[in-house]
C-alpha cells in the first residue's frame, strides 16, 4: 500500500533542478522577484508538513463505525486532512486559509475487500453519512471539497474510504490481452507487473506515479497519448462497482450491441453511484519501434492546423503536441518567437519485423503535411542569422518584462566584449534588463551548436559569463566555471546533448522506455530527441514546479477543455481575454500559455496554464483571487463551445459549466434527449441519498 508522501498537500519531487528552473523562467517572464518569504512557505502552509490541530471528529458520526466491518478506521489529524484534499492549487489554498478550522473528513477507513467496501457504504446509508472514495489524492477539480448541499438531509458528517489496501494486480491474461486489477493499484505498480510479459496498459497521465486505476475509471481520465486508445473509456473491458444496495458488475465481453452500455453510466460517475472495486483493462504489447520529429512554426494556430491535417489524413501519432510560444519557453523548447509541434509514431513491431519502416513511413507522410502548413523540421541547430534574430527577440521581450529592474553594466560589458571577440553580433542591453533573466532568455534562444565548425552561441554566453564572474568577484577561471555551472543548472541550461524517445515528450515515467527491456528502435534526429527530452523532463516535473512556484511567491494552475477545430481560435482568444481581463481588474500581471494535448479528426483538447504573482497577505485572499480567475475561465469555456472537462473530471470546480453543458446541449439535440444529473451538487460524494 502506498503511504502518503511527506507533505500534507501537493506533489513529491519539489525543488528538483528542472522544476526550480521552470519557476525561474516563469518569474522572469512575469518580471517579478521570487522569494520564500510568503504565505506559501510558512508553517502550516499548503506545501508544508506542519498542521494546526483540526476540530475533533463528530462523535455521532463515528458511532458504530469500528464495529461495522468496514476495515481499519483511522482518525489522526494528518490522515483526516490528507484524505480531504486533492492536488489542485485551490486545495492547497483551502488548507492554508482554514488552518485550525479546516472542514476535514471525520475518519478514514481502509477496506481490504469488496465486502468491507459494501459494509462501509451500507453503514453510511444507514447512518446518513457521506462516504467519499479516495485513491491517489491527485484530483485537481475539487472533488474532495465538501459543501452544505452534500450533506443536506444527512447527519452532516462524512468519512473517506482510502483504497490503498486494495491495490493488487489479480490476473494477467496473455491470450485475451487483459489485466484484472484492484482500484487502489498505482500506475507504476501496474506497469511493473506487466513488464515481464512484454505488455503495457499504455496509460500514462501526468499523475501516473501517484494516481490509481480506480481513480482513472471514476474520473474518466485520459493518458498522454494524443490519439488512439488514450481515454480510460477505451481501455475498460469490464468493471465491478459497490453501491449501498449491492454490486454492479458489467459483462466481460470484447464488444456488445445488446442495449445501452452499462459501463458508460459508471465511467466518470466520480463516486456518485458507488465505489469501483475491480477493473478489467485491455492491454497491449509494448511498443518496439518509434520515430519522432520536432517542428517550429511562426504561430500557434499554424501548428494546430498542421496537427489537424495529420490526424484528418488518418495518421494516428502517439504524440502530437502543439505548444504555443510562451509555453515553449517555459518548457525549455523554444525562444519565445516560435510555436513548437512535437510529433512521434510508434509500433509494436520491432525493427526485424518492419517496425522501423512503418514508423518511418508514417513520419515521412506526416512531415509533408506539416511542412505544407508552415512547419520547419528541426533537423539541425539553426543558423547564426536565426540565432541572432531569436536572441534579439528574446532581449526585446525581456526588456519589456523587466523595465523596472536594473542592469549590471559590468556584466553587460563583459558579455558584449566576449561576443565581439568571438565574432557574434553585439546586442545592446536595455537599461531595464536584469542580468540573470537575460542569461536565461538568451540561452533559450541559443541552445546549441550552429552549423559547421563555428562555436555555438551558447559558448559565447558561457565565455561571457566566465569573464563576468571573474571580473566581478576576482575568482579564478576554474572557480568562475564552477559558479557559472551552478547558476546555469538553476536556470535549466543544457551543458551537454541528451537523447530520448521523441514520443516520451508528454509521458510521465514511461515504463517501457525507462526500463530498457523492450529493445525499441528510434528513428529521429538528435535535435528532435533533445527537444523531446526537454519537454518530457519539464512535463513530468510540472506538478512539483507548481508547488515550487507557491514557495517562491507565484500562483500557478492549469485547466483544460475540448472543442471542435472550427471553434478553437475563438475559444482560445476568449479564454485568454477572460483570464487576462480578470487579472487586470485585480491589478495583477499574468501569464497564460496553451498546448494541445489530444487531437481528433473533429477537434482537440487545449490545455491552459495560468501564472500570477502572490501579491497578497494570506491564503484566504489568494483563494478569493484564484476563484475569480477560474470562474472567468470556466465561463469563457462555456460561452465559446468548450466542455467542462476533457480529462480533469467535473468535481466541484467545474460543476457550473457541466450543469450548463448538459442543460444546453448542441442545438441539433432535441430537449427530450437531455438527461439531467439527479443532484449535481453531490457529484463528488457517495453514497447519494437516493441510492440508500
Image (tube, grey):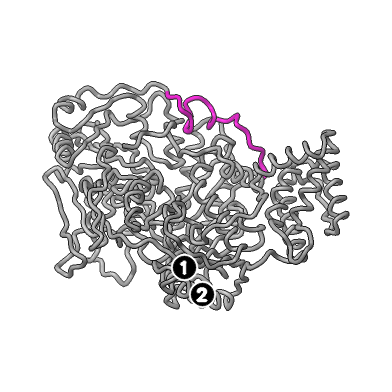
Q: Which mark is residue 366?
A: 2
| Vertical placement of residue 296 versus 19, above or below | below
Determine which quarter of the picture holds residue 323.
bottom right
Crowd class of label 2 (few under 14; some 14 to 19; many from 20; radius 10 Å): many
How far across and down, in percent of the image, does residue 322 sit?
53, 63
Magenta portion: prevailing SS class = loop
Crowd class of label 1 (few under 14; some 14 to 19; many from 20; radius 10 Å): many
Q: Which residues are magenta?
A: 31-51
Q: Is residue 209 visible?
A: yes
How far across and down, in percent of the image, does residue 653 sit?
39, 46
**Residue at the (39%, 58%) spot, across then down:** 646
Q: Give left or right: position of 145 versus 685.
A: right
Q: Nearer the viewer, residue 474 or 274?
A: 474
Quadrant of the frame with the C terminus: top left
Q: Is residue 552 magenta?
A: no
Please state the total of marks drawn on the protein image. 2
How far across and down, in percent of the image, does residue 490 sit?
65, 41
| Residue receiving disc 1 | 345
How far across and down, in percent of the image, does residue 116 sit?
16, 37
Q: Nearer the viewer, residue 494 or 296?
A: 494
Q: Give left or right: position of 366 versus 149.
A: right
Instruction: Give the structural element (helix, strand or loop) at label 1.
Output: strand
**Residue at the (50%, 54%) spot, across then down:** 608
Instruction: Give the structural element (helix, strand or loop) at label 2.
Output: helix
Q: Disc 2 vs disc 1: Cβ atoms closer than 8 Å? A: yes
Determine which quarter of the picture holds residue 550.
top right
**Residue at the (14%, 31%) spot, across then down:** 69
Amino acid at each position: 500500500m502506498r503511504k502518503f508522501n511527506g507533505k500534507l498537500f501537493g506533489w513529491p519531487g519539489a525543488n528538483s533542478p528542472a522544476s526550480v528552473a521552470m519557476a525561474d523562467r516563469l518569474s522572469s517572464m512575469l518580471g517579478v522577484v521570487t522569494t520564500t518569504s510568503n504565505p506559501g512557505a510558512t508553517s502550516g502552509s499548503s506545501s508544508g508538513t506542519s498542521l494546526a490541530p483540526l476540530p475533533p471528529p463528530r462523535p455521532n458520526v463515528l458511532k458504530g463505525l469500528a464495529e461495522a466491518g468496514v476495515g481499519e478506521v483511522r482518525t489522526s489529524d494528518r490522515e483526516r486532512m490528507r484524505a480531504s484534499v486533492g492536488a489542485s492549487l485551490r486545495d492547497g489554498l483551502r488548507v492554508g486559509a482554514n488552518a485550525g478550522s479546516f472542514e476535514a473528513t471525520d475518519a478514514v477507513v481502509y477496506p481490504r475487500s469488496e465486502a468491507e467496501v459494501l459494509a462501509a457504504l451500507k453503514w453510511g446509508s444507514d447512518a446518513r453519512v457521506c462516504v467519499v472514495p479516495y485513491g491517489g489524492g491527485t484530483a485537481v477539480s475539487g472533488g474532495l471539497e465538501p459543501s452544505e448541499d452534500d450533506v443536506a438531509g444527512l447527519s452532516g458528517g462524512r468519512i473517506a474510504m482510502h483504497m490503498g489496501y486494495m491495490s493488487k494486480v489479480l490476473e494477467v491474461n496473455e491470450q485475451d490481452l487483459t489485466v484484472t486489477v484492484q482500484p487502489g493499484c498505482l500506475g507504476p505498480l501496474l506497469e511493473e507487473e506487466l513488464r515481464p510479459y512484454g505488455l503495457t496498459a499504455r496509460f500514462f497521465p501526468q499523475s501516473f506515479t501517484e494516481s490509481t486505476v480506480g481513480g482513472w475509471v471514476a474520473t474518466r481520465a485520459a493518458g498522454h497519448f494524443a490519439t488512439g486508445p488514450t481515454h480510460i473509456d477505451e481501455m475498460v473491458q469490464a468493471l465491478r462497482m459497490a453501491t449501498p444496495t449491492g454490486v454492479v458488475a458489467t459483462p466481460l465481453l470484447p464488444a456488445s450491441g445488446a442495449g445501452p452500455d452499462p459501463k458508460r453510466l459508471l465511467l466518470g460517475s466520480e463516486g456518485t453511484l458507488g465505489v469501483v472495486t475491480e477493473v478489467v483493462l485491455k492491454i497491449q504489447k509494448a511498443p518496439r519501434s518509434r520515430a519522432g520529429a520536432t517542428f517550429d512554426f511562426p504561430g500557434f494556430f499554424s501548428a494546430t492546423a498542421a496537427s489537424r491535417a495529420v490526424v484528418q489524413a488518418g495518421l494516428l501519432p502517439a504524440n502530437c503536441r502543439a505548444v504555443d510560444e510562451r509555453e515553449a519557453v517555459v518548457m525549455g523548447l523554444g525562444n519565445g518567437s516560435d510555436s513548437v509541434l512535437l510529433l512521434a509514431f510508434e509500433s509494436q513491431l520491432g525493427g526485424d519485423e518492419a517496425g522501423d519502416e512503418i514508423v518511418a513511413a508514417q513520419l515521412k507522410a506526416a512531415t509533408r503535411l506539416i511542412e505544407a502548413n508552415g512547419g520547419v523540421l528541426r533537423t539541425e541547430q539553426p543558423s547564426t542569422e536565426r540565432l541572432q534574430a531569436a536572441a534579439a527577440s528574446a532581449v526585446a521581450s525581456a526588456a519589456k518584462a523587466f523595465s523596472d529592474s536594473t542592469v549590471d553594466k559590468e556584466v553587460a560589458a563583459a558579455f558584449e566584449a566576449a561576443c565581439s571577440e568571438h565574432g557574434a553580433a553585439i546586442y545592446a542591453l536595455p537599461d531595464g534588463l536584469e542580468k540573470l533573466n537575460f542569461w536565461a532568455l538568451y540561452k533559450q534562444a541559443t541552445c546549441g551548436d550552429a552549423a559547421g565548425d563555428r562555436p555555438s552561441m551558447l559558448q559565447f554566453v558561457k565565455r561571457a559569463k566566465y569573464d563576468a564572474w571573474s571580473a566581478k568577484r576576482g575568482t579564478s577561471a576554474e572557480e568562475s566555471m564552477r559558479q557559472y555551472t551552478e547558476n546555469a543548472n538553476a536556470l535549466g541550461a543544457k551543458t551537454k546533448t541528451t537523447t530520448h524517445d521523441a514520443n516520451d515528450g508528454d509521458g510521465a515515467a514511461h515504463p517501457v522506455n525507462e526500463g530498457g527491456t523492450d529493445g525499441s528502435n528510434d528513428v529521429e534526429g538528435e535535435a528532435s530527441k533533445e527537444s523531446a527530452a526537454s519537454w518530457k523532463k519539464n512535463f513530468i516535473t510540472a506538478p512539483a514546479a507548481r508547488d515550487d512556484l507557491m514557495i517562491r511567491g507565484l500562483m500557478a494552475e492549469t485547466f483544460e477543455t475540448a472543442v471542435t477545430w472550427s471553434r478553437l481560435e475563438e475559444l482560445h482568444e476568449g479564454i485568454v481575454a477572460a483570464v487576462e481581463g480578470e487579472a487586470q481588474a485585480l491589478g495583477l500581471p499574468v501569464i497564460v500559455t496553451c498546448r494541445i494535448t489530444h487531437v481528433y479528426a473533429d477537434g482537440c483538447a487545449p490545455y491552459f496554464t495560468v501564472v500570477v504573482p502572490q501579491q497578497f497577505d494570506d491564503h484566504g485572499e489568494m483563494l478569493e483571487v484564484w476563484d475569480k480567475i477560474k470562474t472567468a475561465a470556466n465561463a469563457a469555456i462555456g460561452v465559446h463551445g468548450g466542455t467542462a472537462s476533457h480529462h480533469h473530471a467535473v468535481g466541484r470546480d467545474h460543476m457550473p459549466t457541466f450543469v450548463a453543458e448538459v442543460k444546453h446541449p448542441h442545438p441539433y439535440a432535441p430537449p427530450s434527449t437531455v438527461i439531467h444529473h439527479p443532484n449535481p451538487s453531490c457529484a463528488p460524494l457517495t453514497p447519494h441519498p437516493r441510492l440508500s
